[in-house]
Amino acid sequence: MHVLIIGAGPAGVSAALYARRGGADVTVIAKEIGALKAAETIENYYGIEEPVSGSELARRGIAGARRLGITFVTDEVLGITGDGTSFAVEGKNELYTGDAVVLATGATRKTLSIPGIREFTGRGVSSCAVCDAFFYRGKTTSVIGAGEYALHEVQVLLPHAAKVQLLTNGGEPPSGVPPEVAVYTERIARIEGDRRVARVVFADGTTANTAGVFLAIGTAGTAELARKLGVLVEDGKIVVNAQMETNVPGVYAAGDCTGGLLQIVKAAYEGAQAGLSTVRCMHKKK
């Protein structure tokens, strides 16, 4: 059995350790170690005699996991697909396949504070092109973002929408934007419409008509990746049971992305439980 773990923080590494010790092959995929690296000093964690930086604690955790034969890959995850028995994780650099997935991607990042985004969420504003592209067949759609994830969402929309626009909100557009995609680099002032999204207004007063706006800021966050798999998300948090199982067979979640106490000890516990659950799933299939 091959377990794919998205996220290299305490939850992801703990899940990797327990899945590996249970006999699974494990690949951890992450662009970076996450929020732990921002912690200047940690001194309330079991076994730490002297204060340690978050970066150092992360280094030790990953080094210990590598010693057990766990593979770590530095890549940006753009999307995940699966049918409950096999999964494919689409990275910027490579496609990874496995039998189970553990989402340990940390807390959902905040959205842009642009007037209209909150008001039109679910009425023309979306964060998942895979989920909602079908509803925009033959219509004009827009993607807000300036990175590889934004480009990925553009590619998802192209076969469905009559026209796709990339709105970088002041950022530099990524390389490789298809020539048929209109690119707007102006800052966004607001999103307007009546009952649904109708247009985007830029800071210079110009507008771009659109039936839908897809948010793809930075890299794919927890909620975005979960929704692509059909995983239940409430208030930006992945819903799990006591075994860290989501509503989708073969998909587990652990750490800050499940809400609750945003502490290392909680993330490590949930990661351990998720890793054990993947092993139980492996034995049931035999």
Image: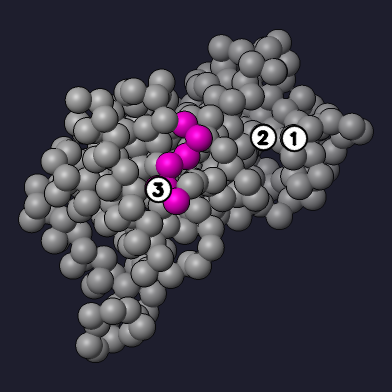
Image side of residue 195 versus residue 88, left or right:
right
Residue 126 shows which numbered tag? 2
> Looking at the image, which is closer to me, 175 or 112?
112
Q: Is residue 256 left or right of residue 92?
A: right
Q: Position of residue 162 (x, y in %)?
A: 67, 12
Pointer 1 or 3: first along the chain? 1
- Three-letter code for the amino acid on which mark 1 is drawn: Gly
The reply to whether discs 1 and 2 touch (Cβ–Cβ < 8 Å) is yes
Q: Which residues are magenta?
A: 242-248
**Majority SS type along the magenta span:** loop
- Badge 3 is on which residue? 243
Closest to the observer, 177 or 218 = 218
Quadrant where the N terminus sits is: top left
Say which element carries label 2.
strand
* Residue 130 position by quadrant: top right
**Can residue 170 be seen from the camera position used here?**
no
At label 3, which amino acid type do we have?
A: Gln
Give percent across and percent down for residue 123. 79, 32
In the picture of the structure, the residue carrying the numbered disc 1 is 122
Q: Residue at x 74, y 39 (%)?
A: 121
Rendering coords of residue 153 (x, y %): 53, 29
